[in-house]
Amino acid sequence: MNEADIFKVLADPTRRAVFERLAQGEMTGTALREGFVISQPALSQHIAALRGAGLIRERREGRNVNYSVDPEGLAPLHEWLARHRAFWPSRIERLRNLIKEMDQ
Amino acid sequence: MNEADIFKVLADPTRRAVFERLAQGEMTGTALREGFVISQPALSQHIAALRGAGLIRERREGRNVNYSVDPEGLAPLHEWLARHRAFWPSRIERLRNLIKEMDQ
DNA sequence: CACACACATAAGCACACGCTTATGAGTCAT
DNA sequence: ATGACTCATAAGCGTGTGCTTATGTGTGTG
């Protein structure tokens, strides 16, 4: 919900990797676990932490749960960054970046 | 240097508060300590951590050390966020935000 | 009904982390 | 030179965190 939780949650490398992988698309727990050398409870706990920070949401489907990133989950982090970033690129570079973003 | 260290370092509330306060301008260690209920070594260790992540730089002046935020320190975090953010505001809102940023 | 499957929760454990006090290293003043 | 001052480092300690195994809860399948 707030940037404090988000920083804390994303500080863990495994959890960040889970989030990044989940950013590629909705995925079930077992599918998400493939590629990770980690026990099922560990992944479940990481998911709970990500969920608690508002970064992930879940969609139950039978005995499966499909996880996906909450589109607005990173908004507090973005706001924090915008507020405390000391380095702002020049106007021209910002426009260039914006155009690049819009064209992708 | 990389987003892993930055997330880890900024996960601590005290350290984040130190960084935020330092973002208001260059400051010496003793001045920075005022307002924090913390020992001098603790602050020194937090500063070392922030420095290790590339978020802070120092400028020695006699027996004092003036600390200030590294202008490009948050760049890796910004890049990470730009890479993994699922939610992008609309074009119009982005332009509005950009204009607001430029006018401040 | 019984069993397999997907996921969550509980309990315990090893380790990391942030704090403290004590001390070291360097600089200014008398 | 001696003492005050600023900051860094060392050592030790309590707590938090992430992992494990064991178990619980709910849902499909035979």
Image (tube, coloured by chain):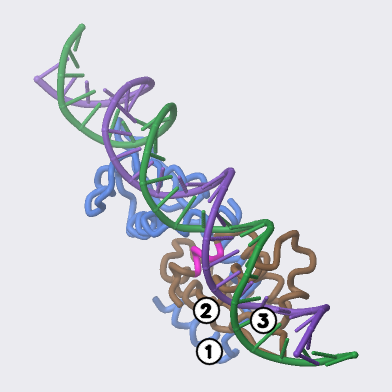
Chain colours: A blue, B brown, C green, D purple
Most frequent secondary structure within the magenta stretch: helix
Residue B79: percent from left, percent from top:
46, 75
Q: Is residue B6 left or right of residue A81?
A: left
Find residue B35 and report its horizontal and vertical position in percent: 79, 64
Q: Position of residue B15 (x, y in %)?
A: 62, 65
At x 48%, y 83%, the residue is A99
Residue A4, position in %: x, y? 59, 56
**Secondary element type, mark 3:** strand
The residue nearer to you, when weighing A2 against A90, is A2
| Pair 2/1: label in front | 2
- CB under 8 Å between discs 3 and 1: no
- Describe the element under mark 2 as helix, strand or loop: loop
Can you say which quadrant of the picture contains the C terminus of chain A?
bottom left
Q: Which residues are magenta?
A: B6-10
**Residue B27: quarter of image:** bottom right
The circle on residue B27 is none
Q: Nearer the viewer, residue B81 or B34?
A: B34
Q: Nearer the viewer, residue A42 or A86?
A: A42
Residue at coordinates 50% horizontally, 69% vertically from top-left?
B6
Specify the label residue B54 is tagged with.
Answer: 2
Residue in the image at 60% along x and 68% along y? B46
Residue type indicated by callout 1: Glu
Q: Chain of mark 3?
A: B
Residue B76 visible here: yes
Q: Which residue is mark 1?
A: A93
Give the Cα distance between marks 3 and 1: 28 Å
Q: Secondary structure at mark 1?
A: helix
Rate crowding at label 3 as few (under 14), some (14 to 19) or many (20 or more) other CA atoms within 10 Å: many
Rendered image: mark on residue B67: 3
Up/down of D12 relative to B15, above or below: above
Residue at 31%, 48% in the rendered image: A27
Is residue A45 shown left or right of residue C18?
left
